[in-house]
Image (tube, rainbow, N blue to C red):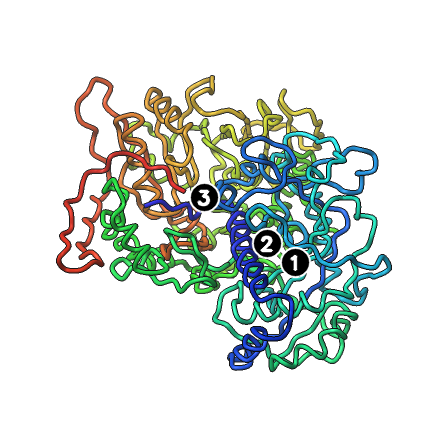
Amino acid sequence: MEFVSGYRDEFLDFAALLFGWFRKFVAERGTMGTSLEGRWRQLESQIRRLPQDPALWVLHVLPNRSVGISLGQGSEPGPGPGLGASRLLGDEPPLHLRDLSPYVSFVSLEDGEEGEEEEEEEHGARPGTEKVEPQEGGEPAPPSKKFPQEAKPAPESEVTQQEASREEGSREERPEDERAPEKRKGRKNAEAAPLHLSCLLLVTDEHGTILGIDLLMDGAQGSVGQNPGTENLAPRAYALLCHSMACPMGSGDPRKPRQLTVGDAHLHRELESLVPRLGVKLAKTPMRTWGPRPGFTFASLRARTCHVCHKHSFEVKLTPCPQCSAVLYCGEACLQADWRRCPDDVSHRFWCPRLAAFMERVGELASLPFTYTAEVTSETFNKEAFLASRGLTRGYWTQLSMLIPGPGAPRYPWGSTSSLSCLLNGDPYQLLQGDGPALMPPVPLEPPRSLFGSWQDYYTWRGLSLDSPMAVLLTYPLTVYYVITHLVPQSFPELNIQNKQSLKIHVVEAGKEFDLVMVFWELLVLLPHVALELQFVGDSLPPESDQQHFTMQRDGPEVSVRPGSGVSARFNSGTKEKGGRRDLQIRVSARPYHLLQGPKPDLVIGFNSGFGLKDTWLSSLPRLQSLRVPAFFTESSEYGCVMDDQTMAVATGGGTSSPQPNPFRSPFRLRAADNCMPWYCNAFIFHLVYKPPQGGTVRSAPGPAPRPPTPAAPPVPARRRRGEKKAARGPRRRR
């Protein structure tokens, strides 16, 4: 069994969804031709019988004049004629956005006349740029007819204006580590020139669910100077609407809207005689009289996929395994193929009873005290809508989803001077704020009188309302706090960690955690008697961050920042030096952990580690074995904990302790494309159990023994015997 839920960038799943839907749409449109007769009449008849969606549907027309797409071939960067889906998003999809850099890059078409195209980042977070990967068999979408130069999008379309601003803003706010490796010289060769996405047709409902897309490519950059028009879009738009109703991209069965509105005045007039054929009412005027609802945003929840063939739910009907109810399949053939996989310990036959036991944790993991618990722990949780409805569209909140900051909302990258200088105003929580009132109350005057073991206890002492979503960000420092105050004393009492006045902690394979570095300030609030040093280590950190060092200090309500030798920025503070002040030192080492040199830490912590997903763990785990330092790790599921235990056994001969639910896990349920298991950031905690120095057996792990798997009969004919379960043979690379 191989799952990457909780590890793979959401944008990649989104791109795979767009590719699959667009490929199917282009194939069916090609077989039916461009005529509205014949099979179109049959399709229209089918759509008229569809149930009505009470939500209003919107046809957006989003022109694009400055962004092109340069496609590489294989693993070598460079412009090329295209790239097939199987290589980009097929059986071996990348886990991180930077893995796409050899294949897809965005280029600025505005500099084409000067002979040089500046390369843009891969992560286009909105429709105008993120729909570029869908290519059928490596070929661009069929080009539309040439557009008159004078045509312009309807200025009164509020949604169109908002989407256009998001397109331009997303390119400026993408992180540096997602940039393509080099600039490429402009080429006059038409085949090597970047493709130009001249216009995007997008069908959504009023809540933001994407129902269909059509990409209009007009080839090389030579046509960039022209503004795409909409005079010839009516047939394409009508075909898109039909397909969006018969085969909606988002969740839900085929349906037609009660009403449709269009984001372009000319296209609205063209569709007045066509849309009524479908039994759909067209708004009397274009979108000039209608705007998106306040919570309008593109949801991250997308169509699910078959675990074996990766077909989406809009292509086939998906059902879970009848035994474990954990894994989704499109039919008996894929279920049987997964059941019979070799070797046996990667087959669903081996994993089915274990996954059934994991599914029993659904209720336990969703048992949280927050007022919004039912919403955020649901399988259909719309994360973007939740954050947008609460004004959480800036600062650190944008790193939790595919949202980008709105106009006038600065986004501070992890290593910027602005990110640290906000502390100089005495507000270390500035990057945790939303658009409304302050989310973090003032620090209590008295330190904690007892140890916190739940969100309920911490929220009560901290003065937070149970309606506050701060737990989503504070899961990282509170997990560190829980390890220091509860787990280390329980598992390593000889360290006497609670009486130490200073602690050196290594945060290994730290990428996202360092992007949220200011949240760790809360450790000084919770542990005011301890001087802490956090060293973030990992080769996923940007090389320019290597050897950076700065110190955050607190004296009452005042906060100051002292740069170390690795920080070029200078910070000044009016805080006076006083004795007995504790501080939080931050160090950065952009390298694999096994290459790190320096003093031995008191504690090692890793978040959502995924040992089997990265080869460097096979070197880093032996390094930890040699240090024999207490090392605690979190995982987003019990499945990940089992895989980590196997990796530890292969790498060192040791193992891991029995995983236990983390009381300070994130309340947001993570999206799972091909399974129904509960996934949460920092859901479970375990520690490494090292192999004894001079042979012998591995010491038993503390805590309760793992529950035996529930026996389950294979979902095959009765005459087929179930094979004996074999011991785990080691980690298997997960897709």
- The alpha-carbon separation of the residues under discs 2 and 1 comes to 8 Å
The quarter of the image holding the C terminus is top left
> How dense is the environment of label 2, judged by Cα within 10 Å: few (below 14), some, or many (20 and up)?
some
For residue 436, which numbered disc appears in the image? 1
Of the numbered discs 3 and 2, the one sitting upstream in the chain is: 3
For residue 439, which numbered disc appears in the image? 2
* Proximity of marks 1 and 3: CB atoms separated by less than 8 Å: no
Which amino acid type is marked by label 3? Tyr
Quarter of the image for residue 519 reads top right
User: In this figure, which residue is indicated by the disc labeled 3?
Assistant: 7
Which amino acid type is marked by label 2? Leu
Q: Residue at x 31, y 31 (%)?
A: 648
- The alpha-carbon separation of the residues under discs 3 and 2 comes to 28 Å
- Residue furthest to the right in view is 150
Quarter of the image for residue 435 reads bottom right
Q: Position of residue 85 (x, y in %)?
A: 52, 46
3 vs 2, front mark = 3
Q: Position of residue 650 (x, y in %)?
A: 29, 29
* Proximity of marks 2 and 1: CB atoms separated by less than 8 Å: yes
- The alpha-carbon separation of the residues under discs 1 and 3 comes to 31 Å
Q: Residue at x 57, y 27 (%)?
A: 579
> How dense is the environment of label 1, judged by Cα within 10 Å: few (below 14), some, or many (20 and up)?
few
